[in-house]
Amino acid sequence: MNLFVNKGVKKFLILLTSVLLVGVMFAQILAYVNGVRFKREMVVHDYELAGYLSQQHPELSSSIQAAFTADKNPEHLEKGKSLLEPLGYQESIQPYLIPRVNRFYQTNRVNNFIFSILLSLIILLAAYSFLKAHYQRIDRYHNEVRRIMSGEVSTRLDDSEEGSLSKLAASINTMTASLYTHIEKEKQSRVFLKDILTNISHQLKTPLSALHMYTEIMKNDSSDQEVVARFLNKSENELERMQTLIANLLKLAKLDAGIIGLNKGHHMLNDMIGQVAESFEIRLLKEQKTFAVQSDGKVSYFCDREWMFEAVSNLFKNALEHTTAGNRIRILIEETPLVVKIIVEDNGEGIHPDDINHIFKRFYRSKFSQSKQGTGIGLTLAKTIIERHDGFISVESTLEKGTKFTVHLPNLQNCKI
């Protein structure tokens, strides 16, 4: 870990270095002052010594002057030692026995003590200030984390500085944002579950009520075979509607839950759309509607065939439910280097402008629609499937003229294998 990345540590080290440099400079000044004081003490001592000798031996004044100004040699040193050491005046003598040395020592000791105390206090004050600010940040983080743990997941640690603590704050913010996202998704999932259960209950209530009514009618008119046959047919239609609704809901729930992985491969869209039309062939004949597929050529696309078949089937079924006898349904396949389009268009009743922005919502049923068929979930399922293929669906419609759904699929992914 690089401590110098931390802004607070850098400031503290700079401050500490500055204090030590000032201390070194002050120590040098103090040493110089002590040297001057020592020189003064030595000069005063020499004055006293010269005065004493001159007073005791006035005739030796010139020799005394020479003693302090002439050069000295080792012989002089040895002679002096032999003269003074017998009297106890030697290197091992205690400083307090020499008055001027003792006074110099006492004064210097006090000055050095005061200087050391001041330098130590400044360093301790700098360290205290740094540690106080450091642990105040830690305490603030601690309080913020406790708030997050108590449920305030919108809380963020405000720290834009550099250093390890700032990195910790950024990591906590990232974790909190992730936690907030998960909580919001969980809330949305609960709302979705509540809504879908409400919608399922509402959607199943109508066919179940109808089945109950048809059953009662058949019980009361069991002798009339024509009535029984007609209401059995209606019951069969309602049961088929319920089966389709439940099947689509299960498919949509699986896609929403993300428990299904797309099994992609290269598939011929022309053949798949032809099979979609075949699955509705009987209904097309029965309802007297025409169908055509148009394409400039064979178009292969990298997709999950089963789910793409489901999406196109729902778009085709939607067109069937909103057209009448004599209307036509057409599917066009277009390919460019960037996009593959599957266009499902009809010349039926069209979509009312008030509905155009709501048709992909779950269970949305238009009050303007002439068709009472369907479950209100087919377009939602188709949209979800196409989005899972990284595409989208657009819609254009004019009342009484028809509707065109266009599936836009990115063509660059066709290079995937």
Image (cartoon, rainbow, N blue to C red):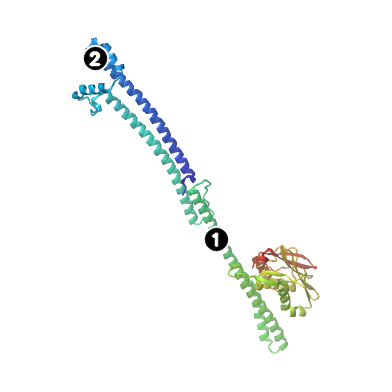
Farthest residue to the left: give it: 86
Q: Image quadrant of residue 56?
A: top left
Q: Image quadrant of residue 238?
A: bottom right
Tag 1 residue: 182
Pointers 2 and 1 in contact (CB under 8 A)? no
Disc 2 to disc 1, C-alpha distance: 100 Å
Q: Within 10 Å of the Cα at label 2, are there few (<14), some (14-19), or many (20+) other Cα atoms?
A: some
Farthest residue to the top: give it: 59
Tag 2 residue: 53
Q: Amino acid at mark 1?
A: His
For residue 355, say whether it is visible.
no
Rendered view: 30 above or below 266: above
For residue 415, say whether it is visible.
yes
Give how far across and how far down residue 99 sits, in percent.
Answer: 25, 23
- Of residue 333 and residue 290, the one placed in the foreground of this image is 333
Position of the C terminus by quadrant? bottom right
Q: Earlier in the sequence, mark 2 or mark 1?
A: 2
Give how far across and how far down residue 261 sits, in percent.
Answer: 60, 69
Name the element at disc 1: helix
